[in-house]
């Protein structure tokens, strides 16, 4: 890997969690480099079609966006299409860099750069939080209340905490299982990022990582460490229950005292399913679905969802309500192929990344945000290129497998 290639790849990774426009600029520079050196792909056209189609599997998820433009032409439909372009662009970048430099070298640079980006993001949030806490002369306990957590914590970056949490989870998984962090530092990194996840209140990422750690410790039969971890989880639960902060309690409460779901997402799921049931084949369209959802939110008395024009908060329901069966089948097809491919390649880290992604999408419309599309594009490439990097190398060098 040449110095310019390494620097651009690092710039791309470090900017990913920090700034969307800066990251897009880095991606544009990478594409420009690839175009300049396009002649090096002398064997690309003659390569096996199956290999190339596999690499560009995420591209299938652009089909519902194209359908949206034809079904209901609007600026919103065009914006959704543009936001989905990383599903095509990321495989191009991986094809070039993995083919030329090898999978492990590319992933190592991306891991270090994204880790640095996450740490920079965290440090800036911490400094901003502590500054506000200090100048307002607040009690220490206020550091764990709504004014310094979740969206309030990340507002200096104008970033959604749940999506930053996904990148933190990715770093934790790669650091723990790919062994790229010295063992004497790994424990401290895990503790640091775990506290960061709590401050983000990225509940999906928190649960996913705790399940990962507990499952792994059971697998390797580290019962003493498992007991310690479970003890810490119990202590955290007690701290939340006894906390004076109602905000913190509500965030981690599933069923309230009235026996109802504390989070209203379940009722909002019904709204999206209702819209899908009226437009099973084509969906309501990217613009009409927002109008219909808001009408139903207002009818149901869901003031918060109506005023904020919430999306489905479930990726499958979002595709179904917006693009009908076309969107739903495209989404399930891509996920199924990724799961099967990772399993057949014995890529259990990749398999777990897909499974946890599916978990994230149960309560978030991940692919409706740029950071979410980029996250899925990234983990898809990490899976599809891992055990096929030899094919990518052959493509780059003009030979067949």
Image: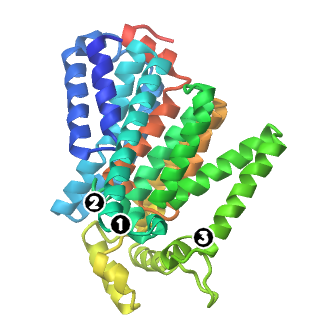
Mark 3 falls on what kind of element?
helix
Indicate the position of residue 256 as horizontal and vertical percent values: 60, 84
Under circle 1, the secondary element is helix
Does residue 296 appear in this view?
no
Distance between the Cα atoms at labels 3 and 1? 38 Å
Instruction: Name the foreground residue: 190 vs 327.
Output: 190
Looking at the picture, does residue 366 appear above or below residue 321? above
Residue at (56% x, 33% y) in the render: 175
Name the N-terminal-most of marks 3 and 1. 3
Q: Which residue is mark 1?
A: 322
Q: Residues within 10 Å of mark 3 (few under 14, many from 20)?
A: many
Q: Are marks 1 and 2 in contact (CB under 8 Å)?
A: yes
Find numbered disc 2 in the image and state the secondary structure of the residue it sits on: helix
Residue 192: % across, % down: 52, 44
Side of 348 relative to 327 (left or right) = right
Answer with mark 1 or mark 2, whichever residue precedes in sequence: 2
**Disc 1 from disc 2: Cα separation:** 8 Å
Image position of 29 with respect to 301: above or below: above
Asked whether the residues under the numbered discs 3 and 1 touch, taking CB atoms below 8 Å apart as contact, a structural biologist would say no
Q: Which residue, given by chain and number where applicable, does mark 3 sit on?
A: 240
Residue labelled with disc 2 = 68
Q: Residue at 72% across / 48% down in the picture?
A: 214
């Amino acid at each position: 890997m040449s110095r310019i290639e390494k620097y651009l790849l690092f710039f791309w990774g470090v900017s990913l969690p920090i700034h969307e426009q800066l990251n897009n600029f880095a991606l544009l520079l990478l594409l420009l480099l690839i175009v300049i050196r396009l002649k090096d792909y002398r064997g690309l056209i003659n390569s096996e079609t199956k290999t190339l189609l596999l690499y560009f599997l995420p591209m299938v998820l652009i089909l519902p966006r194209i359908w949206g433009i034809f079904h209901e032409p609007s600026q919103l439909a065009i914006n959704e299409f543009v936001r989905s372009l990383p599903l095509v662009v990321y495989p191009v970048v991986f094809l070039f860099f993995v083919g030329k430099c090898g999978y492990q070298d590319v992933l190592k640079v991306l891991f270090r750069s994204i880790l640095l980006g996450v740490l920079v993001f965290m440090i800036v949030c911490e400094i901003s939080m502590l500054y506000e806490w200090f100048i307002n002369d607040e009690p220490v306990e206020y550091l764990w209340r709504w004014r310094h957590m979740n969206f309030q914590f990340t507002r200096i970056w104008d970033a959604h905490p749940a999506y930053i949490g996904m990148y933190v989870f990715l770093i934790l998984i790669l650091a723990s299982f790919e062994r790229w962090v010295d063992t004497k530092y790994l424990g401290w990194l895990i503790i640091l990022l775990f506290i960061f996840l709590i401050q983000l209140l990225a509940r999906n990422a928190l649960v996913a990582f705790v399940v990962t750690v507990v499952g792994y410790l059971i697998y390797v039969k580290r019962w003493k460490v498992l007991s310690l971890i479970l003890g810490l989880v119990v202590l955290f639960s007690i701290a939340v229950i006894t906390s004076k902060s109602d905000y913190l309690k509500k965030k981690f409460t599933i069923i309230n005292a009235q026996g109802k779901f504390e989070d209203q997402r379940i009722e909002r799921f019904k709204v999206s399913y209702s819209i899908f049931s009226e437009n099973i084949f084509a969906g309501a369209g990217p613009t009409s679905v927002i109008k219909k959802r808001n009408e139903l939110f207002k009818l149901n008395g869901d003031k918060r969802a109506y005023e904020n024009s919430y999306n489905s908060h479930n990726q499958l329901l979002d595709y179904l309500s917006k693009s009908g069966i076309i969107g739903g089948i495209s989404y399930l097809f891509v996920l199924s192929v990724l799961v099967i491919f990772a399993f057949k390649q014995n890529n259990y880290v990749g398999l777990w990344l897909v499974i946890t992604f599916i978990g994230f999408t149960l309560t978030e419309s991940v692919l409706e945000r740029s950071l979410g599309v980029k996250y899925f594009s990234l983990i898809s490439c990490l899976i599809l290129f891992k055990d096929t990097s030899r094919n990518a190398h052959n493509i780059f060098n003009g030979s067949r497998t």
